Amino acid sequence: MAGQFWMGMIHSLQDHIEFRQLIRISKQTVMKKLPFLLLSVCALFSCAQNQEELPIVFPDGDWEEKTPEELGVDSEKLEEALAYLASKSGEDGLEEVFIVRKGYLIRKGDSISKVHNIYSCSKSFTSTVLGLLVDQGTVSEETYAKEIDPNLAEYYPKLQLKHFASMTSGYSAKGDSRWNEPSKDWSWTPFAIDTPLFVPGEEYAYWDEAMMMYGRLLSIKSGKTLKSIFMEGIGNEIGFRDFEWWGDEEYNGLPLNNGCTGVTIDAERLARFGHLYLNKGNWDGKQLLSKEWVNKATQNQVFAKKVADTDRNHLDGRGSYGYNFWINGMTPSGKYFMPDSPKSLYYASGLHNNMCFVIPEWDMVFVRRGEDGNPPEGKHIVYNEFFKRLAVAVDKTL
């Protein structure tokens, strides 16, 4: 028994010695490799810092191009998301797609220089002109329409400019649609004042005649065309180049650009417009449009409880429409307008799937243009799914 005891003690002592030797060896190994470990950690930290601090740039002439991976976007997953979008688009597909992250062009279609109307995306340009005039002190959001055109006093005594910008004006003109469709909108006489659709601010109606009158009022008050106000205040500074903006009649010899449509540009210039908004109206250090206006224009401005009973009542901007921008806001149903998309997202939207999305939380501008019709499912439904798929491709920490 005594022999077994002493043998057990000897084995325990050997185990203890081996353990201490192992610890000593491990310490020596760690100390030898410590400088390399520290360098690796520092390198990783430095990379993370560099990614976080990657500055936003602005195009000086042409956009600087980088691979999606250089801007934290997985190419394969990006293409998978774009393939879905192409499957829901018409014949123009991805030809005029233009994707910018942090001011770098990471994906472009083959027809980005194609020039055509951006249709109702033009409305966002009209509200931008209002923003410039507000910044200049020429008008305010609360300026009454009758103060600019007294002819509006009888039927529209409470109508303000903010009502036009939020599609809650109730304005309508005499006559039926010029497009031979069953509608009271888009008459040949958009400035022939008719009785209101509703009391301003109390209902929502996406109404193009209202936008035409809105653009007219801004030109009358400023004494300038919408295009000239935009180019003087923004376009010339951001490299926009000259462009066409369709007209609709004149006022005392002053051409009236159409407030609802007619801005005729290419994808590259539409991306510049989006990049200005992404940067809160600032272009390479110069504040061209106030942050206050950008914030107002891109947050919900529709507090009406009802969509007006018109042929346009399928368009519901309650909780999801700013000053001529669609936003990913909370709808009356209690759900986000595009529930699977970034919550900060907002966009200009036009006929034929002409779109300019601004996604602040990704520092991204996404443009898709065409002349090939709208997705039958509805644009916000298709793009909600698209951005859901794109989200898995984007590094959110960059």
Image (tube, grey):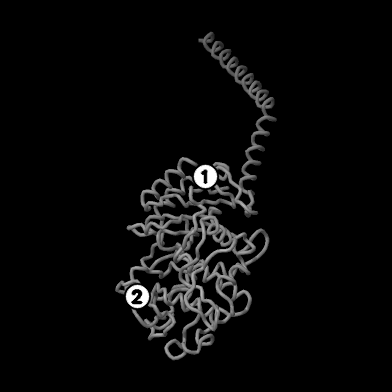
> Tag 1, which secondary structure?
loop
Taking 318 as reference, is 238 left or right? Answer: right
The amino acid beneath tag 1 is: Val
Q: Quadrant of residue 221?
A: bottom right
Q: CA distance from mark 1 to mark 2?
A: 45 Å
The mark found on residue 73 in the picture is 1
> Tag 2, which secondary structure?
loop
Residue ID for mark 2:
177
The amino acid beneath tag 2 is: Ser
Q: Quadrant of residue 333?
A: bottom left
Q: Is residue 65 above or below residue 318?
A: above
Q: Tag count in the figure?
A: 2
Taking 204 as reference, is 28 left or right? Answer: right
| 1 or 2: tag closer to the N-terminus | 1
User: x, y percentage for residue 154?
Assistant: 44, 91
Q: Is residue 246 above or below residue 139?
A: above
- 294 or 22, which lies in front? 294
